[in-house]
Amino acid sequence: MKSNLKRNTRIKLIALLSSIVLWMYVMAIVDPEDTKIFENIPVTITNAEELQDNDLIVYPETDLVADIYITGKLSDLQKISKDDIHIYGSINNPIEGKNYLYLKVNTTKQVSYEFKSDFIIVKLEKLVHQEKNINTEIIGQYKDDVDTVTLQQSVANISGPRVLTDQVDYINATVQVDTKDKNKATKRVKLIPVDTDGKEVKGVNLDIKTINAEVTFLEEKQVPINIQLKDEKADTKVYELTPEIVMIKGKKEVLEKINYINTQKIDSTDIGVSKEVDLIIPEGVAAEETTTIVKPKDEESLIQRLIYNNSEVELRNNTQEIKASDLNIPDSINVEVQLDSNNTKLSKSDIDLYIDLENGYDKNKEYLIKYKSDTSFKNVKIIPSTVGK
């Protein structure tokens, strides 16, 4: 076996050398032609400065690339890489809209070329410069405490393709107020071009990206609450309020003129044990509380409550023999009595409830529940006060 291998070695060497010589002959003497395709080669616009001078830009932005076939000797093709191919072109008489970019290439003289397509369609848009107003949007924990926001400037310049700049309605400056250590604060805010829906228009350039915003906060002041009664002669000192003071916020010049906050005018007979009353908040002022509770002083010791049923309500002058059910008298009638002295102890026998039917019964009419007593009271409140209808 070994002897056979040794005998074949000489033959093998001769065959290998013959192959190398033959290949070198083909490459050196014959060197056949071949074609190779190079794809996605970047394309340069040679008259880009002309486009800029005419305020034209490529939009939508895209990578300009082309495919090219290179034909030449096999030995030459093997020396060419993608980086050796430089494709370029110019746009003649550029206009806004569709344009044709005709392609050329720099190659060696030893090869020829052919483009997959001799041109590229390029869309140009007018580069527009506009001035837009800056609008402020206030957000954050203390946004309701902000009085004014003064921006470093009220307008800014934008630039970009006409199709984008036409979408911009204004420039938004969002001021976030999450702290309030002083009456004034300066914040750096970002500017964003937005459309009519407040959505960002991307692809538009701003001449400035951020500006300063000076935030001034509303003043605060505590003032007492003043009760107002419809009966101007009535004594308001017999009532107490909860709360008695209220914190108000507003501009300094407005708060300086306010020394108290009035309640809506109320009827003292409607107060009973207590009554929630709306506050009259002046225009341009905000208040932490918008209502207060009015009640007689020492009410717990001077107020007594009695509960009557409908059979305990007397129907006087009832010539038509009307029943309690005809008048829709409820099963439970509450009577709250404000006494002159806490030494008085009341029972239902001290107060008689009645309805006077002297003028006859009318099912479309309401009737007042009245009372009669030999005891003197500061106030009596009957709930409900009327029946019928």
Image: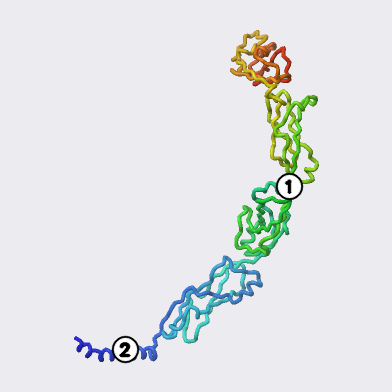
Residue in the foreground of this view, choosing between 200 and 8: 8
Secondary structure under tag 2 reads: helix
Query: Where 180 sits versus 298, above or below?
Result: below
Q: Which residue is mark 1?
A: 218
In the rendered image, which quarter contains the N terminus? bottom left
Q: Quadrant of residue 255?
A: top right
* Disc 1 residue type (three-letter): Leu
Q: Residues within 10 Å of mark 1 (few under 14, many from 20)?
A: many
Q: Which mark is residue 346?
A: none
Residue in the foreground of this view, choosing between 270 and 184: 184
Residue 314: image x %, image y %? Answer: 65, 11
On the picture, is 47 further left or further right than 39? right
Q: Which residue is mark 2?
A: 19
Residue 298: image x %, image y %? Answer: 71, 25
Residue 191: image x %, image y %? Answer: 66, 59
Give me the residue at 69% from left, 50% from top. Answer: 180
* Disc 2 residue type (three-letter): Ser
Residue in the foreground of this view, choosing between 365 and 126: 365
Give me the residue at 64% from left, 13% from top. Answer: 313
Give me the residue at 56% from left, 72% from top. Answer: 100
